[in-house]
Amino acid sequence: MIMSELARLVDAIYREKSIPRETVIEIVESAIEAAARKALGTTRDLEVQYDDDAGEVDIFEFKTVVEGEAETETEISLEEAVQEDPDAQIGDSLGFRIDMETGELGRIAAQTAKQVIIQKIRDAERELTFDEFKDRKGELITGIVRRFEKGNIIVDLNRAEAILPRREQVPSETYRPGDRIQAFVLDITRATRQPQVVLSRTHPGLIEKLFEMYVPEIYEGVVRIEACAREPGQRAKIAVSSLDSDVDPVGACVGLKGSRVQSVVGELRGEAIDIIPFHEDPARFIVHAIAPAQVARVYIDEDSHTMELIVPDDQLAKAIGRRGQNVRLASQLAGWKVDIVSESKHYTQQDEARNELVRVASLDEEGVELLLRAGFQSAQELADSDPAEIESILGVSEALGAQIVEDADAVVESLIMEEAARRQTSES
């Protein structure tokens, strides 16, 4: 590539890369100047000018006219200067056009310029990509699968490339080059050697944006997605609420004959979606979230942020779900740790707890039942509790609350001794 060919790059790059013409010209001028300095030395006063009308690139070297002999490369003696310009005077700056079109000097300069141009064009493309997509983080985007690199999918976004990392892919989904793909824009980076737009097919935001696309009430803000939990490719749960009492949030998301939710399911390639009505009361919310299973009773422990759900025996498997999926998603959706217990097991635990609590000397029968309803399941739990909590539950005095806790501790010691005696008897 000779120097005259560099000028033709301006139009080619402008057309193919969509980089502003002024930016391309600056890149070409900067590249040729860098090449010239590498070939001629860094101490010279050089200037590169691109003539847009003629489509030519000129290199000029400037020298200051001095009296006597020139001592540096940026100076020229008056005697030499008047040979170039008869009107030259001391102190003038004269420009000399440098011909780098031919010879070894031109070849080296052109090669250097080409390398610089390629690098600067890449830098400009990255900056353009960042500027174009920096405000699209968290949005839904559509592209075409182009190729695969080390398990990652490279997606063509028309004017840029995006990457769908292996970790953000749904294992059950497969793609081929040319396939259309919709994904969630996870991040926009200033990466230097890879696509800057990072996509995800596993992020919960993908479901939220798909519902926003297919459900006008969500897009308009009338219906709101309060929470979303998913196991990508398998099942998801979303909790929805409505700002308008006349709009059913679940019905709006399901659509006529399920048309809206099925559109989302189709985009997710068959991932099942449960749509749950949101409720401010955690207990009511978890009852909805654990659907389709029915719940008989809910116990809440605020301190450990745990809920215990008591379900009919025939609902236990349904509540837990295949490999624990249903309770796991419900727990993620509600933001609480959730334990599932069948009614039969619960009654057994209650009987065992009752047998321990009735041994607490300072507790009457009514107090035992109140503590059982409050979720106490052993004398140990009562012994570990705060007397103030017992006072609040039973409505007793501070002194009696402390006495109950002390008596419970005594019962625990007795139970430990009885268990040790049983073991000794069985061993002998």
Image (cartoon, grey):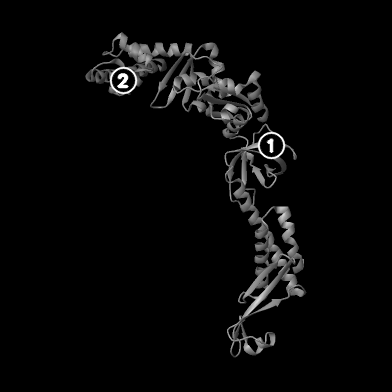
Does dot 2 land on a helix, a strand or a loop?
Answer: helix
Where is residue 154 drawn, in percent x and y?
68, 44
Say which amino acid is labelled 2: Glu
Q: Quadrant of residue 218?
A: top right
233 or 385, which lies in front? 233
Q: Earlier in the sequence, mark 2 or mark 1?
A: 1
Where is residue 9 drawn, in percent x and y?
74, 61
Label 2 vs label 1, nearer the camera: 1
Q: Residues within 10 Å of mark 2 (few under 14, many from 20)?
A: some
Where is residue 335 drawn, in percent x and y?
48, 28
Relative vertical location of residue 231 with respect to residue 343 in this rendering, above or below: below
Where is residue 310 drawn, in percent x and y?
47, 15
> Which residue occupies 61% across, 53% down?
127
Relative vertical location of residue 252 with respect to residue 107 in this rendering, above or below: above
Q: Disc 2, disc 1: CB below 8 Å?
A: no
Say which amino acid is labelled 1: Ile
> Which residue occupies 51% across, 27% down?
333
Q: Quadrant of residue 138?
A: top right
Residue 16 showing in the rendered view:
yes
- Quadrant in which the N terminus appears: bottom right
Q: Residue furthest top?
A: 365
Label 1, on which residue?
Answer: 181
> Which residue occupies 26% across, 19% down?
401
Residue 321 showing in the rendered view:
no
- Quadrant in which the C terminus appears: top left
Left or right of 246, for residue 82: right
Does dot 1 land on a helix, a strand or a loop?
Answer: strand
Q: Give the CA separation, mark 2 to mark 1.
A: 65 Å
Q: Quadrant of residue 291?
A: top right
Which of the numbered marks, if any, corresponds to residue 413? 2
Relative vertical location of residue 309 with respect to residue 87 in this rendering, above or below: above
